[in-house]
Image (spheres, rainbow, N blue to C red):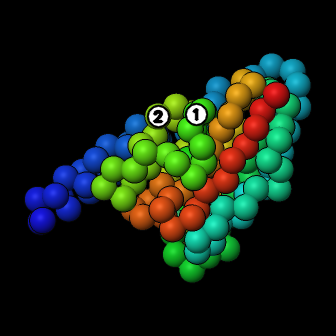
Amino acid sequence: MKTRTAATALSLLAALTVGLGAAWATPGRSQAPSKVAVVLSEWKLVPSATTLRAGKVTFRVRNDGAIEHELVVLRTDSHHHALKVKKAVAVETGKLGEIPKIVPGQELSLTLSLKPGKYVLLCNLLGHYRAGQFAALRVS
Ligand SMILES: [Cu+2]
């Protein structure tokens, strides 16, 4: 059991490190981004919009909870309730970006270029996805 916990911590660390590199989209040309406010708490992730037009989107993410959360953006055809979970963490297939750490009371932004498709927003800290911290997003 101890070994398993260590392995989980390591894979989380690896995911965070990768996320840091990928989190910030390169600055685009023209076109003002759409803005989506996202509020995180235990155990909710509530976006101000669930349908968007394709293009640059800025997520402004506020942690209204009592503990640390994060934002992960996945492009996936999987239903938002049915992402594959391994060791209490959703498998992040199709990840486009991430804000890996948002402390209580903090607000951080992430701008991504989104193509048409189905997306899932989630907090993927250990156990948080399964606790209900996710929302679906559709881009057309
Ligand atoms: Cu969380």
Q: Nearer the viewer, residue 9 or 121?
A: 121
Mark-to-mark CA distance, 2 and 1: 7 Å
Amino acid type of the residue that numbered disc 2 sits on in the rendered structure: Thr
Q: Quadrant of residue 3?
A: bottom left
Mark 1 lies on a secondary structure that is loop
Residue carrying label 2: 93
- Secondary structure type for disc 2: loop
Q: Which residue is mark 1?
A: 76
Query: Which quadrant of the rendered structure holds the C terminus?
Result: top right
Q: Give me the residue at 70% from left, 38% from top.
A: 111
Q: Which percent across, then down, holds residue 135?
A: 67, 53
Q: In the image shown, does 18 or 137 lie closer to the viewer?
A: 137
Contact (Cβ within 8 Å) of mark 2 with mark 1: yes
At label 1, the amino acid type is: Thr
Which mark, residue 98?
none
Give left or right: position of 99 versus 36. Answer: left
Q: Nearer the viewer, residue 137 or 20?
A: 137
The residue lying at 63 percent from left, 72 percent from top is 41
Residue 65 drawn at (x, y percent): 61, 76
* 78 with respect to 106 (left or right): left
Number of dots carrying numbers = 2
Quarter-wise, where is residue 1 in the image? bottom left
